[in-house]
Amino acid sequence: MKKIVFVWLIMIGCTQKPDRLPIQSEDTLYGLASPIRLGFDTTKLYWNDYFPLISKVDSFNLPSGLAAIKMDQGQGIILTGSQINGIDNLRVYIKGSTYDIPVLKSRKKQYLFRFEDREKKYSSITIAGSMNGWVSTKDSLGFSNGYWIKPIILDPGEYQYHLFLDGKEMLDPNNPDSVDNGMGGFNSVFEVVGNDTEISMYPDSVWESGFSVKGTAKGADYFVYWQNYLLPDSYVKKSDQGFSVKIPDESKKIDRSDIRFWASSGEAVSNDLLIPLRKGRVIQDPSQLLRADKHKMIMYFALVDRFFDADPDNNRPTPDSEIKPLANNLGGDIRGIWKKLNDGYFDSLNVNTIWLSPIGRNPDGAWGLWDKGGVKSKFSGYHGYWPAKSRTIDPRFGTDQDLIDLTDLAHQNGYSILIDYVANHIHKDHPVYELHPEWATELYLPDGSLNTEKWDEHRLTTWFDTFLPTLDLENPVVADAMSDSAIYWFENFQIDGFRHDATKHVPTDFWRMLTYKLKTRVMMPQNRAIYQIGETYGNPELIGSYISSGLLDAQFDFNLYDASIASIGREEISFSKLESELEKSLQAYGGHHLMGNMSGNQDRPRFISYADGSVDWGEDSKLAGWTREISNQGEIGFRKLAMLHAFNMTSPGIPVIYYGDEIGLPGANDPDNRRMMIFDQLDPLQKDLWNSVSKLCSLRKENISLIYGETVVHQADEQQFIMSRSYFEQTTLLILNKSSEEIIVKNPIQDPKTIESFFGNEYSAGEEIAIGQNSFEILTLTK
């Protein structure tokens, strides 16, 4: 039965009758409408991304400066033109109801890249860099009047690149500016300059019926949304100090709703504020949040085969001598995760979301080959990423009942369960490939070469290996069948979301189809919150292209991860790198994104082994894991890893602990970074790190400023990083010190009423703060 909400917006300070808004059906637009981020010239808007159950939109009002071209069959509109202001509103009318969607103007500019070559020494030049996925064949320069030139459409920011001069890769010999690439080399760099005007806002104070916002937006305009309504001017009052917002009375009738706020001046747009409400009151205590509130997630990734073996009866390693032990099944199972949840391990760690590696049926036998450094090994499908069936749990991991028991226990205790899903490819023994080999992309390119591991050159068709056919998901028939297989897991189990493998290798139309099916068959009929997070290596534009109301909720922020481990783990890398990447993330995904901030990853060496020197930053890390023993090398690695956890737990987004990073499990790259988890006989350094991570998770869970706070970086230099998150009366301050000496810093937060130290130190207002070598401090301050 459809729920109908009648909304009357009450005029402030007036005696006239309140404006009455049209009736809005909660079953029409599910959740908060993600802002429309305009492209440089055109933007496609699919109505089903926002309104999956409607057959047509009655009418709409466009932002100033935009025009619309209707798509075929009424699927949506193509927005053209140039929006006048940095933010504006799209109003949509459907069956007498009104819906409002924020529209953000593109920040892109046309940048002319030039390379001087007066004597034309070169016959061809191409550029590869962070702007084009490092594909050398994508952008060729043209020659004109002594210069090789290439116009490129880019967002403001810094871009790293190499040139290919007559096919030879090198730094730009005409550009003295270069940066460390974090892999033992350097990249040339150029900058696209943006708008110098910046507006920053923060939530200031709360009262029963409203709240105030302050910042640098004197005289600015504002856009304030309650749910998907743009509030009229009567709900917002401007002053020299900022803005005051009245909370709509109708929000008292809804258990959970949200207010979003932007300030703008011309093309300049502030950070976005997200204010959660519970029955019409601003939430200031995180205990009032619901399990469905995605921003409160603290995620733990468990590689099922390597976590805990609770059922020895399902242990069936592949009996093949060509497989080294670490590349074979080791016995972990779903029941093992259930047991650790039941025993209170995750409670003690203070996480609330568990992400499982793929649990679908994988092939028997030995596949693939490592043959390097005098070591040879094949692999079993212990990791789960080679699906041989799409709707069957691998018996080596457990049974349907095991997954039902796990989700039941999790939900009873306030946990959410995500499973890893592989949509891009299947194993060649999969029934789908046996029945429909034409559903796969071509293994060979037109020139006869293998189309394998062409991650960026042939992003949507490349095979991961010759036994892993990539599905042609641009074919609607294939996409329909395979998205049904994905929906199976939600229709038969009470899981709470997917982590999607190899997201960028799948066309966005598939994710649109899958999300549409999830909304119409699961989320809206059952009022069930589902979280989808993807995995994409690439620039923010590519990563962000998969995130919206009709696609995924988020992706893992590998760029921020790379910047954080380099800044914390390497003495020669300044924290300015971390600040720059953090700013790019906030610009690209918004200040209240749901991106994953991870401590590690199954495809990367363990950070602790980089940090303590066990693995060199520039070496072949897979070879290192196969050819020598990687072990912890003293206290320094544990200190650095604790700093990384501290950054993740205080940053916007969703903190994600890679299993074993709570105890400093060492390892080079795959499969050495996938050792069996250990729970007993921890040494003192492992115990201390575990206690720190548990306390950091607790701090994240109990401090609303770390969930909904605005982010400010106060200092980022060679040795120190200071960042704050502020939400009304509470501010949390992170201080990182990666130097080998104690440092003294001044508290940048003025006149706090109380100061609580992560380590229990006592500080008074205005007092300087001492931070030990290779350590951190977190202060929670209240006004």
Image (tube, rainbow, N blue to C red):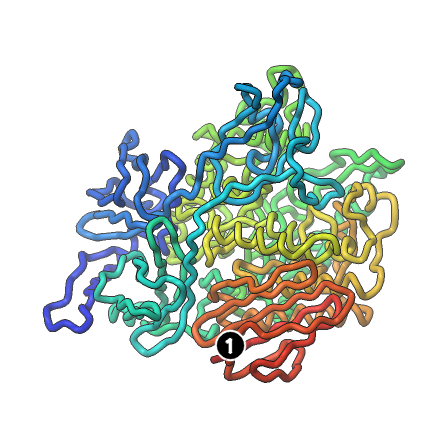
Q: In this view, does 214 lie to the left or right of 677?
A: left
- Residue 753 against residue 679 in the figure, above or below: below
Residue 30 location, x and y as percent?
A: 35, 53
Residue 200 x/y as whole percent: 43, 61
Image side of residue 359 versus residue 24, left or right: right
The percent position of residue 733, horizontal first and vertical second, equals 57, 70
- Please indicate whether residue 52 sits to the left or right of residue 619 in the image: left
Quadrant hosting residue 388: top right
Q: Residue at x 42, y 47 (%)?
A: 548
Residue placed most toward the observer, 601 or 312: 601
Q: Is mark 1 on a helix, strand or loop?
A: loop
Residue 571, percent from left and from top:
75, 56
Which residue is at 73% across, 68% downward? Answer: 689
Q: Quick check: can you spot residue 343?
A: no
Q: Disc 1 marks which residue?
A: 750
Q: Nearer the viewer, residue 493 or 111?
A: 111
